[in-house]
Image (spheres, rainbow, N blue to C red):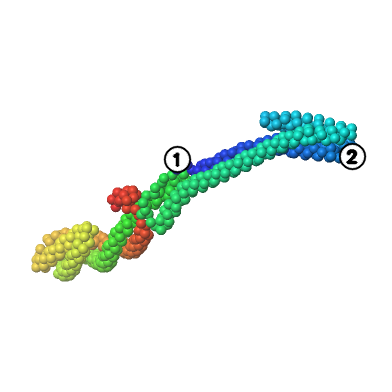
Amino acid sequence: MPTSHLSIAKKLASLLCLILTLFLCSGLYGIFKLRAITQEMNTMFDQSLAIERIASDWYRNFTNAVQRTTATVKSSDPALATLFSAIAIEGSKQSSVQQQQIKERLVDESDKRLFAEIGEHRKVFLAVRDEINKLKAAGDAAAAEQMFNDKYLPVSAATDSKIKELLSRQRQRLDEAGERIRSASTQATALLSALCAGSILLGALLAWRISLSITRPLKDAREVAHKIANMDLSGQAIQVHSGDETGELLQALSSMRTALETTLLDVRQVAEHIATATGEIASGNADLSHRTEETATHLQSTASAMEQLSATVHQSADAASTANQLASTAASVAARGGEVVSKVVSTMDEINQSSRKINDIIGVIDGIAFQTNILALNAAVEAARAGEQGRGFAVVAGEVRNLAQRSAQAAREIKGLIGTSVEKVSDGSRLVQEAGSTMQDIVNSVQRVSDIIGEITAASVEQSNGIRQVGTSVTQLDQMTQQNAALVEESAAAAQSLREQAARLAETVGRFQLNQASPALAQANHRRPLLG
C-alpha cells in the first residue's frame, strides 16, 4: 500500500499499530509458551515429582522395615521383636497410604504394571515379615532366621529393586520434563527475542522511512525558505512527491514562490514604468517651467505697456475735456456773433467792428478746429493701438476730424464772407440775413462739435477705466503665473523625488534572482507591452 499520500498522523499511527501488533503477537506467543511450560510444570509437580517424593518416602519406610526385620532376626531379645512388630504395623499402614497415593497418580501403563509388581512383591514381603515376627515371638529363632534368609531377603531385594526402578523412572521423567521445560523456555526466549528484535528492527526501519519522508521535504522547504530569505528565486521548480502535511507545505511554498515571483515582476515593471513616466513628467515640468517663466516675462511687459497706454488714454481724456471747454466757449462766441448779426440790421456802423470781432472769433474757431483735428488724429492713433476694442473709438475720432475740417472750412467761408461784407457794406443789409443763418449754422456746428467732444471725453474716461481694469487683471495674471511657476518647480522636484524612489524600488526588487524559465516570468514578459 503506498504511503506517500498518507498524513503524518496516519503514518505514525500505522507505525504504532504495527509495533503494537508485533508486540501483541510476541506477548500472545509468550503467554502461550508460558501456559505450556506452566502446564508441563504442573504435570511434573502433580505426577512425576509427587510420585517421586511419595515413592521416596515409601522406599524409606520400606528400608526401615527391612532394617527392623533384620534387627529382629539378628537380635536374641524377644522384647525387641514385640516392639518392632508394633512399629512395623504402624509403618505398614503408612506405606499402604503412600502406595494408594502413588497408585492414584500413576498415568503411564508401564508404571502401572511396575507398580502392580511392586504391590505383589510387597504382599509377599509383608506376609514373610509377619511370619518371621511370629516365629521370633514364639522363640523359634532358627526357623525365623531360616525364613529370613530363604524368603525375606529375596523378596525384599526384589521389592527394593522394583521400587528403585519406579523411582528411577519418575526421576527420569522429572529430568525429561525439566529438559522439555528448559527447551521450551529457551525456544520461547529465542523466539520472543527474535520477535522483539524483529519488531524493533522493523519499527526502526519504518520510523527511519517515516522520518526520512518527513525530514527530506522539511529540508527542501528549509532550503526554499533560505533562498527566498536570501532573495534568490532562481531555483528549479519545487517537486512534491507526497500528499501529507510536508507535501502540502512544499506545495504552499511553491505557490508562495510563484506568487512572489509574479508580484516582484509586476513591481519591477511598475517601477520601471513609474521611472519612465516620472522622467517624462520631469522633462515636461522643465519645459512648462521655462514656458511659464517666458509667459511671466511677457505678462510683465504687457503690464508695463498697459500702464503706458493708460497714461496715454488719461492724457487723451484730459485733452478731450479741454476741447470740450473750448467748444463750449466757441458756442458762446457763436451766440454772441448771432447777437451781433442781429444788431447789424439796426446799425451798419458797427459792421466793421463786428467784422473784426468775427475775424477774431473765426481765428479762435479755426484754432479750435485745428486742435480738434489734432485730437481726433491722436484719438485715431490710440484707437489703432487699442486694436479691436478701439475700433468704435476710431470711428468717433474720424467723425470728430471731419467735423473739425468742416469747422475750419466754415471758418474760412465766414472769413471770406466777412471780407466781402467789409468790401461790400452796401450789400450788408441783404447779406445780414444770410450771415445770421450762417452764424446759426456755426452755432449748431459748434454745438455738434461740443457734443462729439463730450462723447469723446466720456469714451476716453471709460476707456481709461477699462484699461485700468485690464492692467489689474494683467497684474493678477502675472501673480498667478508666478505662483504657477512655483508650483511647477515643486511638481518637478516631486517628480524627481518620485523618480528616485522608483529607481530605489527597482534596485531593491532587482536584488531578487528570478528563474528565467519560470512561468511567472514568461507571463510577465507577455504582459509587458500591455503595461508599457
**Which residue position holds label 1?**
2
Amino acid at the residue labelled 2: Asp
Nearest to viewer (mark 1 / mark 2) = 2
Query: How many numbered dots are placed on residues in this image?
Result: 2
Residue 366 falls in image quadrant: bottom left
Residue 353 falls in image quadrant: bottom left
Return the residue nearer the eye: 268 or 475.
Answer: 268
Could you tell me residue 492's position as x and y percent?
Answer: 33, 62
Instruction: Give the residue at the far right of this rendering.
Output: 79
- Determine the residue positioned at 72% across, 36% down: 161
Q: Is residue 181 visible?
A: no
Would you place residue 223 above or below residue 404 in this image?
Answer: above
Task: Check disc 2: other Cα within 10 Å, few if <14, some if 14-19, many if 20+.
Answer: few
Structural distance between the alpha carbons of marks 1 and 2 = 98 Å
Could you tell me residue 387's position as x and y percent?
Answer: 21, 60
Q: Name the mark on residue 396.
A: none
Task: Check disc 1: other Cα within 10 Å, few if <14, some if 14-19, many if 20+.
Answer: few
Return the residue nearer the eye: 339 or 468.
Answer: 468
- Determine the residue positioned at 27% across, 66% down: 297
First in sequence, mark 1 or 2: give its number: 1
Could you tell me residue 419's position as x and y percent?
Answer: 11, 67
Q: Is residue 399 visible?
A: yes
Return the residue nearer the eye: 381 or 171.
Answer: 171
Could you tell me residue 9's position as x and y percent?
Answer: 52, 44
- Determine the residue positioned at 47% across, 47% down: 209
Query: Circle 1 — which element?
Result: loop
Amino acid at the residue labelled 1: Pro
Q: Name the mark on residue 77.
A: 2
- Determine the residue positioned at 46% across, 38% down: 1
